[in-house]
Image (tube, helix red, strand yellow):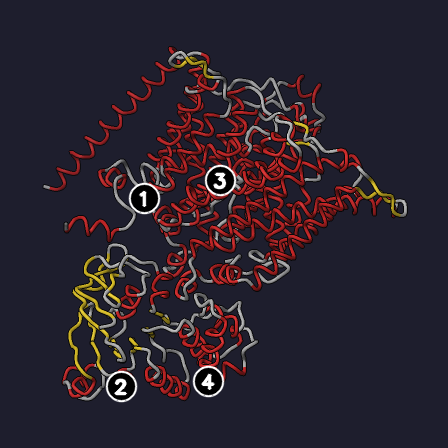
Amino acid sequence: MTYVNSNNSKVRRIWKILILTTIAVGLLVLANTKLRGFYLGVFLLFGINAMACIGVSITNSYANIFSLGFGGIMLVAAYTCALLTLPIDYKTSVLTLPLWLENLQVPFGLALVVSGIVAVLSSIVLVLPAFRLRGHYFVLASMGINIVMANLAINLRSYTHGPLGLRNIPFHTNVWWVYGLLALTVFFVSRFKWSKFGRALISIGKDQTLAATLGINVVRYKIYAFVIGSFIVGISGALWVHCTGSMHPNVFDLNFVFNIIAMLAIGGSSSITGALFGAAIITFFTHLARPIQEGFVFLGFNVPPMIGLIQVLMAVMVILIMIFLPDGLFGSGKISLSSIKRLFATPQVGKERKEEKA
Amino acid sequence: MGLYITQQLVNAVSYGSILGLLAVGYTMIYGILGLINFAHGEVFMIGAFVCYLATSVYSMPLIYGAALALLASTGVGLLLQRYVYRPVIKRKAPLLTVFIASFAASIGLRHIMMMFYTDKRRAFPIPQIFEKMFLVGGVAIGLRDILIFVVTIVIMSVLTYFIRYSKVGIGMRAVSYDRSTAELVGVNSSKVTIVAFVIGSALAGLSGLAYGLSFGIVNPSMGVTPGLTAFIAAVLGGIGNVTGAMIGGFIIGIGEVLFVALLPASLSPLRPLFVWILLFVILFTKPSGLFKPNVKFEEIWE
Amino acid sequence: MLLELDNVATGYGKAQVLKDICLNVCQGEIVALLGANGAGKSTVLRCIAGMIQPWEGSIKFEDTDTQDLPPYALVAMGISYCPEGRNVFANLTVFENLKIGAYLINDTEQFEARLEWVYELFPRLKERRNQLSASLSGGEQQMLAIGRSLMSNPKLLMLDEPSLGVAPILVEAIYDRIEEINTSGTSILLVEQNVSLALEVANRAYVLEKGVICLEGTCDELRDNEHVKASYLGIA
């Protein structure tokens, strides 16, 4: 009996996946053909941000390594990818590179992989030593990485063209790259969440000391998670610069880092749904609401341009969410009744009980 | 060469005072609440900016500008305490949540100022009297530097006395060490927290004011780097330890200036790296800092 | 009646720890709260001290409702709680610890008088008054903790496991002092795992099991009680 049933549900699952994939591909084709310019850019940015969020969430929540250094890692990866794909004549004229690098121009896919690897290596070199610091000290050290990397980018002019940055980066990034890689990332991350490795990570994220007493080799798993997270994050950085076509040392600065943190804070950092929704909300809000900053007419009043309003609104949103819904809108799990109920719950459970009784 | 170094050291003293004042604020708030107020650098910026606005845009005399600066920075500090930190702590949020809220507050404050004033760097009006220089044995010492240093020393003495002997001061030390036990002996920890924020924010505002007078440039992002540097100074001095933070500020101020003075000119853009190198050295050699931390010594390493 | 708990229920987060707690302490009494580990004894004291709030019921001190007050307000009213674990302020000296115990006393004369009395009770503290409290032995720290909670001149002193982690000879000394503190006018609510010790000093006692009061009575009554004898005194 069960044998027949499991076969049935397997078939149904395969159908479900096929249908969803077809719809997704259809949507992507639609986006590719219909969206142009600005809107296409925002759409791509959403995918890239989502990927970065997932990468960051792996290190920050699953592995409990709250590092802000991903800005620096993305910077390194982005420069690497750019250097590998820039047209040779540009490189010769603007930079002073070792000959083998100067004459190299590789296909995008290879460049991505290499930059991912470079991201992993640099995060190992930079972040790992600070690895076992706790709490505030680690956050402080990781902030330093961003600053140090940006500083190096400004100073190593022969490689990076200093503060002026690189232009003419080929526009390799398109819908297929971004969403293909995003889909792969989501697929792998959701698979591994249920594997032994994934569950060990989740337990480390919840309570590290407890996990250690259960025999989980905390340090090793954290390193694995860190490596995976850095790889994903590095690739997303590379995708970004090939989307905008140029880069400079401050592309992934503290404001950018905050945007990603905001996405995770609002969406919820321990679930993929959370990362996706957070990235969606922030990306679409920041870019589509941008015109408000330029000044507009409201009820007959001339509202002057206020650059920075969007960031302020985001900051306020994040603070409110941290106060009332610290797990983000989608906490650790899909959107559910309990997460919405929590929106209206008072902080003290005791008080809740009192009201129930009354 | 010796004269050059001495000159640089003299210049570094006021920079060290500025960092020290900022670091003391950081360390006090950390001591009381166990959390880093990432928006502290922005409070510093607001002190400097308000004084700039008062003296440059509204043409008030410096003394009024300074008073307004202190009021503004204290006010912002209190707002942060009441509307960002208190609600988060009341709900017993984990470190991450508090940190993100703190980070958000920092970004928010910075961009509010940018909204109205853009990130353009503006010249901080420095009254003529501060330009006066004294020549002592070949080294030029400015009146401004002397003033900043003297004010800093006076404030530190008063503060140290206050923390050591006054009732509120002892209450603050008790709450830093063990909040719930302090409440059990009758210390009103909310009141003590507010006092810590007031003092810390006022010091940050003063520091910003001094920075404006020394470097002459203000802009909304001016608080980011000094904020982080001051935090490192606080760590260097032993987190929670007020005297330590001050000394840490001086060490970094003087160290940074020496670092740049001794480097070849081509490498001088590497100046910001000094503090980070120092931080890594501290964290790997003596993470608890130079002096005794004033909090139940939490594990820095695990 | 000095302290009155009426049908108090409370817990931590979603877990309920206490149910239907009714107890009282009269002026001049020593009341013991007994029970095994995890029965909820410390929770009762914490609730009275304002550290956690009761979900149900009321707590009255001198006929005033106190369940919504923060801990520092209760000190002002005359309740002093000495939690378990000897938590002295390790970063302060013995004298500074005592001084902060008198945080709410503004009168220097009163402070000096209290200090002298505590030094009389615990001469060792006087000897070590300028030492950092982190350098004291376990028993001395316990004395310091008790001394500190006496500095506010409380009407009701709540002691949580004063014998825990203290050398037996010092435990005797501490318990002698507890009697002395009581004779001088302070009522005491004592939580103790060491039942025989508690029954020696106290007038009355309550026995707490799994968050409910299962027995109460005078110490003589409880000493003869079969259940108490079997479960807590080890007498079959």
The mark found on residue B196 in the picture is none
Tell me which amino acid carries mark 1: Trp
Residue located beneath label 4 in the image: C120
A209 in relation to A166, above or below: below
C111 in relation to A333, above or below: below
Tell me which amino acid carries mark 4: Glu
Query: Which quadrant: the N terminus of chain C?
Result: bottom left
Determine whether label 4 and label 1 are within 8 Å by CB.
Answer: no
The image position of residue A49, as x and y in percent, is 44, 29
The answer to whether dots 2 and 3 both sit on one chain is no
Residue located beneath label 1 in the image: A194
Query: Which quadrant: the C terminus of chain C?
Result: bottom left
Determine whether label 2 and label 4 are within 8 Å by CB.
Answer: no
Chain identifier of the residue bearing label 2 in the image: C
The image position of residue A20, as x and y in percent, is 27, 25
Identity of the residue drawn at 71% across and 44% down: B15
The answer to whether dots 3 and 1 both sit on one chain is no
